[in-house]
Image (cartoon, rainbow, N blue to C red):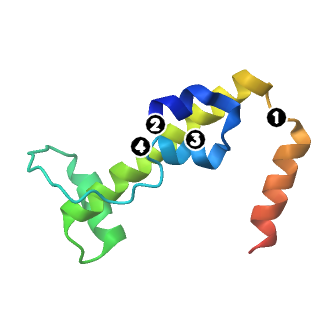
Amino acid sequence: MGDIRIEAGPAFSPATRLRVRGLNVLMGTEKEKVSLTLDRQLVQEIREQFGGRALSTSINELLYASLAQQRLAQLVREMEQESGPPAPEAYERVLAQWFAND
């Protein structure tokens, strides 16, 4: 059903289109054990950032966040192809909203 919604394009809101791509998926329940080799400095930074949490959990969340960013970027590209690039005023409104909440 997700493929059908994606093909519908602008008939669905951007939020719906992101959910269809799995952007709202926070954590899966089924796990698979894998072996990774990571840069030591990167591992240390992740441990510092996430405190005493399990390294696997922290990396899992970081990977989900990275995939969400990629999906969002793809949606933005698709929307720009459909409607053209946003006007500079749109960027100004978004930035004003972000900084208004500080």
Relative to 35, 45 lies left or right = right
Q: Secondary structure at mark 1?
A: loop
Q: From the image, state whether disc 3 or disc 4 is nearer to you.
A: 3
Label 1 or label 3, whichever comes before in sequence order = 3
Q: Residue at x 17, y 55 (%)?
A: 30
First in sequence: mark 3 vs mark 2: 2
How would you rate the neighbour count of disc 4 (Cα within 10 Å): few for under 14, some for 14-19, many for 20 or more? some
Q: Are marks 1 and 4 in contact (CB under 8 Å)?
A: no
Look at the numbered disc 4 and give the secondary structure of its residue.
helix
Closer to us: mark 3 or mark 2?
A: 2
**Vertical placement of residue 55 versus 32, above or below:** below
How many angstroms separate mark 1 from mark 4 (CA)?
23 Å
Residue indicated by mark 4 = 67
Tag 2: amino acid = Gly
Q: Residue 88 or 21: which is nearer the viewer?
A: 21
**Mark 3 → mark 4, Cα distance in angstroms:** 15 Å
Residue 96 as seen in the image, left or right of residue 35: right
Q: Which mark is residue 73?
A: none
State yes or no: discs 3 and 4 in contact (Cβ < 8 Å): no
Classify residue 29 as left or right of residue 22: left
Question: Which secondary structure, mark 2?
Answer: helix
| Residue 61 as seen in the image, left or right of residue 29 | right
Q: Nearer the viewer, mark 2 or mark 4?
A: 2
Q: Nearer the viewer, mark 1 or mark 3?
A: 3
Of labels 2 and 4, earlier in sequence is 2
Badge 1 density bin: few <14, some 14–19, many ≥20, Cα 10 Å: few
Which residue corresponds to mark 2?
A: 2
Pick the front one: 43 or 56:
56
Res. 96 image quadrant: bottom right
